Image: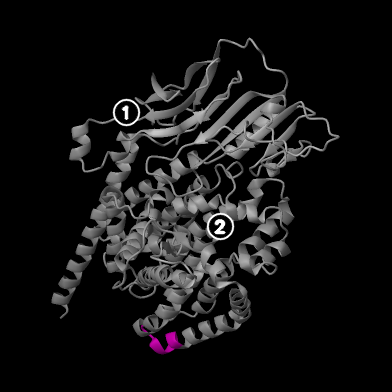
Amino acid sequence: MGNQPGSPVEGAVDRRMPGPVLAVPLILLAASASAFPGLEVRDMTGDEFGHLGQNVLQMLDRSIEANRPDQFSAHMPLAWIVRHLFHGLLGDENLAIWRLHSALGCCLGALLSWWAVWRCRAPVRALAVGLLVAVNPILSFHAHDSTNYAITPLCGAILLAGLSDLGAARGSSRWVLVLGLLLGTANDYFFAFLSLSAFLMTPLLVRWSADPRRARALAMQVWGLVAVLVALPVFVFVKRLVEVPFSQLVYRHANAALEPMTVWQTVQVGLTDFAVSYVEGYGAGIRHQVDPWVAVGPLVLLLCSLAVSLRSRDHLVRSAGWLVALSVTIILITDYVFGQVVWDAAGEDGPTTRDFPSFPRTFIGLLPALAVIWVDCLLRNGRRIGMALVVGLFLLQALDTGRQVSAVSDTRSWAADRIEELWRPGDLVMSCLNIAHRLRDDIPLVAERRLCLPDTAEPPARILMVTFPGGWEADRVGLCWNQGFSLLDNGYRVRLSEDRFLPPHDEGTNSFLESGIRLIVLERSEPDPQGPDIVPWHLEFEPSLLGGTRGASVTATWFTNGDAEDETHPFASRVRLARQTDQLHDFSLIIHPKKPPAWLVKSTFGLLRPFDEPLALWPNMPLPPDPIIPSIKLRTYSVQEPALRVLGRLLNALMGLGALTGALASLRRRKEDAEVNP
């Protein structure tokens, strides 16, 4: 990155290495480690279910919802076309193929982010930017999601390179900037915020260019070509918006807030969520909650990086800073107007509690620009300290990405595997969850909450039921909607109940990684009047990768006739609890982390806060009177070691401090330059 094309910026520390031979494999390795593990087994999200089993024409139709405008989804078709190409080459039997375009999009996004900086003759910075994008927890999450979000960063990287070329009056902006705008527009309708920001930046780039006349001519060519190419798609898009009922459009794209949003709350919450999410991932972005140890570091990193980049002499850094600043400002304005004006216009009475869905996926195209200004600001502390800070930021993101990847929600995959193990000819499988795409073709499945059997059909000997955890379903699921008796009243007995539960991690989560599932096996037979005296409950805990549950304990609370009785056990890989079969109990299960001393928690101002709160894994689960042998499988997040979480929080603070000192160092250099060259 340079003051002029090809020259390094002030304070640059880049060397003539590493080149592509070293950088490309490192970036691909890091991106693959964050994108591919768990690609086949992760549970599907809502957007994925909506496109499951559709051909390319159906996907395009869904992009504009031609048949049902009131269900307009506004997903652009580029990702669906790419996915269809993979289906044609590799088939569509495996979920990994459905998500392959997203995983590869993660890898290409990291590579193009590296390329955008490397082409400016800044190889060390390029490698740092590429690695930060590769291990970003937001991009890693969407790499496992068969939607269009994981492709957006590569469009953002091309857009950023094109804006830099335009500011430097390079002829390559004719195709680089046009390509970035067209790909982004065709992929994600949220990219409109980046496109609008790029349009608003154009006069500034022309003004700052060393050759304003040539830059102005290039800008007119670029935007003229873009206007011609996107005229028809924009016309179709606007036409669909006009046909959608206004209230339905607002409802489908409104996010429920906890309270009415003032201007200050909109700015505070929006900036904080944006800054924290892109450093620590979805789980750390908790709206309306500002924990200093979580939020201050990333927020200072964002603000200081923006302050430095907006006045940078480097075309790429300055373009990245203005792209982020304008895009975030526009989305904050949209957020406030959407919640306080648009939603009220849709008919909600009283103070509104709606706002625009400014989730990290809204801004995911800004990830390459963020990485550029992060690296630029941190490196202004000097070569050694700056590189140490960049490595710290890499580790901070890698910790959260590692925890996310190691704890991928695979509950439906587990349920399908267990069904295939337990199923015998003549059994019937019923499910209120989408698992049909994971089962063998020879296994019959009734994907309904209630099972309807014809009068002439022989009831199956066994029913394998897949449902949500949290309550006992077997005594509420009838044979049909219009029948007044349940399976338990019709000769079926519960023989096995297995649960796989994925609890939220210590920061809470705003993603699909929090999930659970229950598998119940019912057999048509008479109850055993004798039954065993004791029926064991097997609680199988998968040991954490780094011993995150070391020192914790498990408390089972049994409820009988309004009374509660606690049983506490050391946390181990296997814990056995027992109950009397002639009594009906409810119970809850709570994991108590090993608590630090109270004085230490208070004196560290919340640094250790997540580790003094219990985690309720199973609240008030009712048990049936039948003698059964259940097995509850509770997964904890693998990277949950308190020491690692404290390290992450300290790195958070260090990033903020490093960005602040980098901004001050940049200001000091400017003053010195002004004194030397008045």
- Classify the position of the C terminus by image quarter: bottom left
Disc number for residue 659: none
Residue drawn at (73%, 64%) of the image: 57
Specify the farthest residue to the bottom.
Answer: 213
Q: Mark 2 = which residue? A: 105
Secondary structure of the residue carrying numbered label 2: helix
Amino acid identity at mark 2 = Gly
State which quadrant residue 201 falls in. Answer: bottom left
Specify the farthest residue to the left.
Answer: 675
120 displayed left or right of 493: left
Q: Considering depth in this image, is 573 or 154 the residue closer to the camera?
A: 573
Mark 1 Cα shell of 10 Å, populated few (<14), some (14-19), many (≥20): some
467 displayed left or right of 425: left
Q: Considering depth in this image, is 577 or 668 the residue closer to the camera?
A: 577
Which region shows up in magenta?
A: 210-216
Q: Whole-percent x and y of residue 403?
A: 44, 41
Residue drawn at (26%, 61%) of the image: 380
State which quadrant residue 160 falls in. Answer: bottom left
Question: Residue 212 lies in magenta, yes or no?
Answer: yes
Secondary structure of the residue carrying numbered label 1: loop
Amino acid identity at mark 1 = Lys
Q: Mark 1 = which residue? A: 594
